[in-house]
């Protein structure tokens, strides 16, 4: 494969040249991105090297440490701890003579250098035409994404070799001079990771037959050399373990993101599983290679390589976490005819490759098959189904633009409007919104729990002290009605049941329903409302972090009754089904009330009928009564929730301007028809 040509015309929207202030801003942005990449690399080094011995570089220790498998006289695979090929073991043998401490430092620094090289090569392999901005910023962005990705983090932590085959393939495709050198590099990569032999038919079908032959010959020579040096180990690996099956862990574990692992997790075993695996694996390989050949002929060489690598993940007997880096390279592909759709595939890939599956999908039983195979499904989609655009397609360079409301001046002289918060009128992509919602909520849950040191017990004393402060302040302000309301409601059975049900059932249901209706019926207003809710939640997290607060029901000496969970044993309080996962001392400000107030304001502003507005405003009123009556919040918590919601709407207006309808009315322009903005 020839190196990507960067001499094409600049991409539309970037301009032919970058002069004056634009050139300076690009340089500053590039420097800032490289600093971010350096910080991420330093953090990875600190995490690995600051961890006590025995807990870091465990795979490297297992292989080349004093008691490692490469030191023993028996088979490398006797303990199933060595997952490499016999050729990999042969290459690693000389490392057993190195000093253990020096090897750990050298291996970690060397791996980081390989990651940087990988990012630089991937950035230079982008398909032309490449704009000046992309050419300057692609390398630091690529290196940063690699540093954040789970495969790289896993490789650094374990001391694995999985970056080397990927780098060898990229060097063979984009840096090697001559087909024989290219084939030599890819053949060595295949000797380390056998399923990379899929690159042989790719090279053959794209006219690089010398490279394909060199790949096959190099693979055979390396494997033969290992067989001659270690015949017993080679037989055990290729015959007994069927090219690695059963090495490194059970094949049906969720860390094995191959098709074989997925079929085993679904309960298929024996000849039936083997038949399905061979049939589906062959179909995936053929379809992926056809797509890769088309991408190659279209000039998208990096995407062709990434698709083939994804197919290798799918058909591999075992594809562990550190071997999944090929999926991240598929961000080079473009998908979607609308400008707003361009971010869907890259964001999906980055989320899948940087966050654990438990943060991407909720812990629900019916979602287990998807959550347990999320990386496999992404690789399978990239290899066979994602409709990547051709460079000859009109949408490649000129996607359908997003309609925006008229521009308005900033409300405040020193608060500039943020360009990414422009008031778009078209509906955002549903998958992107769902990913944003889920990941944001998962991050919110993690930060909320971490606000008390990672557990409820860690912040209990401080939270109770703050609870007494709030209680004393309310007594001074004559707002301490919680005890009276709580005990009054307890004595009225039907009212207690109603408020308990309202408290537990409507907190998530109503905001999600409002967002869904706005998304479908009022896409422009959906973005405005969603941004306000996001700002309010972010501000609330700051409150949780700075001021952990015990709710009334968890104050031991004040005599409140927990109407939802029953009488509390304060030596071991009952927080419900999420006792270990939810910070019960995140009471100030009350997002229970805040989110309800947000719903009420949005409905009151946007609803067309008076009774809808009244129902909308009734929701925060009932929520306010329920959080006090059930003993879950103080009155001042609700006031705090109101403050962050007001600030959320204020920040949205200050940073992005008024709602689209308001801006259009101020300019004397008609509000776009609802059907016209559906996309």
Image (spheres, rainbow, N blue to C red):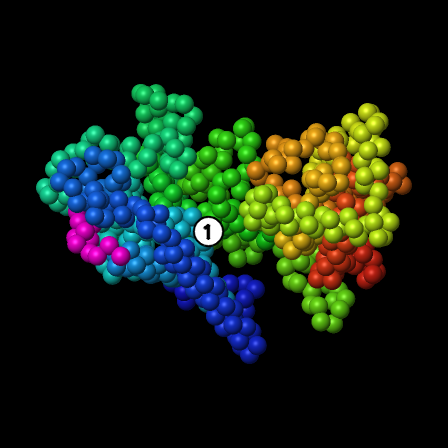
Q: What x and y, as percent, mark residue 535?
A: 68, 54
Residue toward you, 556 or 317: 556
Please identify the dominant SS of the magenta region.
Answer: helix
How would you rate the neighbour count of disc 1 (Cα within 10 Å): few for under 14, some for 14-19, many for 20 or more? many
* Rendering coords of residue 503 (x, y %): 74, 35
Q: Nearer the viewer, residue 82 or 295?
A: 82
Count of number-bearing discs: 1
Percent x, y of residue 403 = 68, 55
Q: Secondary structure at mark 1?
A: helix
Choose top left, top right, bottom left or bottom right for residue 497: top right
Measured along the vertical axis of the image, is residue 80 above or below residue 639? above
Q: Would residue 406 appear left or right of 377 to someone viewing this image?
A: right
Which residue is rendered at x = 14% and y = 37% of the image? 74
Residue at the extreme top: 271
Quadrant including the C terminus: top right
Please state the extent of the stretch shown in magenta in the rendering: 88-101
Q: Does the segment drawn in magenta span residue 522?
A: no
Residue at the bottom extreme, as displayed: 20
Front position in the image: 574 or 133: 574
- Answer yes or no: is residue 550 visible: yes
Residue 510 visible? The answer is: no
- For disc 1, the marked residue is 331
Question: Of all residues shown, which one is farthest toward the left?
Answer: 228
Residue at the image position 81 percent from the left and 50 percent from the top: 474
Percent of width and height locating residue 57: 32, 49
């Amino acid at each position: 494969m020839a190196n990507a040509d960067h001499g094409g015309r600049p991409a539309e929207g970037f301009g032919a040249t970058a002069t004056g202030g634009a050139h300076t801003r690009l340089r500053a942005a590039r420097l800032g991105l490289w600093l971010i990449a350096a910080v991420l690399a330093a953090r990875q080094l600190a995490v690995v090297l600051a961890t006590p011995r025995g807990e870091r570089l465990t795979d490297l220790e297992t292989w080349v440490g004093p008691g490692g498998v490469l030191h023993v006289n028996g088979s490398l695979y006797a303990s199933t701890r060595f997952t490499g090929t016999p050729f990999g073991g042969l290459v690693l043998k000389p490392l057993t003579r190195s000093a253990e401490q020096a090897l750990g430092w050298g291996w970690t620094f060397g791996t980081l250098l390989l990651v940087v090289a990988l990012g630089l090569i991937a950035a230079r392999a982008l398909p032309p035409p490449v704009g000046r901005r992309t050419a300057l910023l692609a390398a630091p962005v690529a290196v940063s994404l690699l540093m954040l990705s789970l495969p790289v983090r896993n490789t650094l932590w374990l001391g694995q070799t999985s970056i080397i085959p990927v780098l060898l393939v990229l060097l063979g495709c984009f840096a090697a001079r001559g087909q024989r050198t290219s084939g030599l590099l890819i053949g060595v990569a295949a000797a380390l990771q056998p399923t990379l032999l899929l690159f042989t038919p790719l090279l053959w079908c794209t006219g690089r037959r010398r490279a394909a032959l060199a790949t096959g010959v190099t693979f055979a020579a390396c494997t033969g050399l290992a067989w001659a040096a270690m015949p017993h180990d080679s037989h055990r690996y290729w015959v007994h373990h069927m090219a690695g099956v059963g090495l490194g862990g059970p094949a049906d574990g969720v860390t094995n993101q191959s098709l074989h692992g997925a079929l085993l997790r679904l309960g298929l075993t024996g000849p039936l599983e083997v038949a399905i695996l061979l049939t589906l694996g062959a179909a995936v390989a053929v379809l992926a290679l056809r797509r890769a050949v088309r991408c190659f002929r279209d000039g998208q060489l990096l995407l062709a390589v990434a698709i083939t690598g994804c197919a290798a993940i799918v058909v591999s007997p075992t594809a562990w976490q550190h071997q999944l880096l090929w999926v991240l390279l598929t961000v080079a592909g473009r998908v979607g005819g609308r400008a707003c759709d361009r971010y869907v595939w890259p964001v999906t890939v980055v989320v899948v490759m940087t966050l654990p599956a438990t943060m991407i999908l909720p812990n629900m039983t019916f979602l287990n098959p998807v959550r347990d195979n999320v990386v496999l499904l992404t690789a399978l989609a990239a290899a066979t189904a994602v409709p990547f655009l051709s460079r000859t397609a009109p949408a490649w360079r000129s996607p359908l633009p997003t309609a925006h409301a008229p521009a308005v001046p900033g409300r405040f002289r020193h608060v500039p409007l943020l360009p990414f918060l422009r008031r778009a009128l078209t509906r955002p992509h549903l998958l992107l919104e769902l990913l944003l919602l889920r990941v944001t909520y998962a991050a919110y849950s993690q930060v909320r729990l971490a606000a008390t040191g990672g557990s409820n017990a860690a912040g209990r004393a401080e939270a109770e002290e703050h609870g007494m402060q709030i209680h004393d302040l309310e007594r001074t302000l004559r707002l301490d009605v919680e005890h009276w309301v709580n005990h009054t409601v307890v004595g009225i059975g039907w009212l207690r049941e109603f408020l308990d049900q309202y408290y537990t059932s409507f907190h998530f249901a109503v905001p999600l329903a409002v967002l869904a209706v706005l998304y479908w019926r009022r896409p422009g207003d959906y973005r405005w409302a969603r941004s306000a809710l996001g700002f309010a939640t972010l501000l609330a997290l700051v409150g949780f972090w700075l001021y952990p607060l015990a709710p009334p029901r968890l104050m031991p000496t004040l005599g409140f009754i927990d109407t939802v969970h029953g009488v509390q044993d304060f030596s071991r309080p009952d927080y419900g089904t999420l006792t270990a996962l939810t910070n019960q001392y995140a009471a100030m400000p009350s997002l229970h009330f805040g989110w309800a107030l947000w719903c009420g304001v949005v409905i009151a502003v946007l609803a067309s009928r008076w009774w809808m507005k009244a129902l909308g405003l009734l929701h925060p009123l009932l929520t306010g009564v329920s959080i006090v009556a059930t003993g879950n919040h103080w009155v001042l918590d609700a006031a705090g929730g109101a403050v962050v919601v007001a600030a959320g709407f204020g920040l949205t207006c200050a940073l992005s301007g008024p709602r689209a309808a308001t801006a259009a009315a101020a300019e004397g322009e008609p509000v776009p028809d609802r059907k016209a903005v559906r996309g």
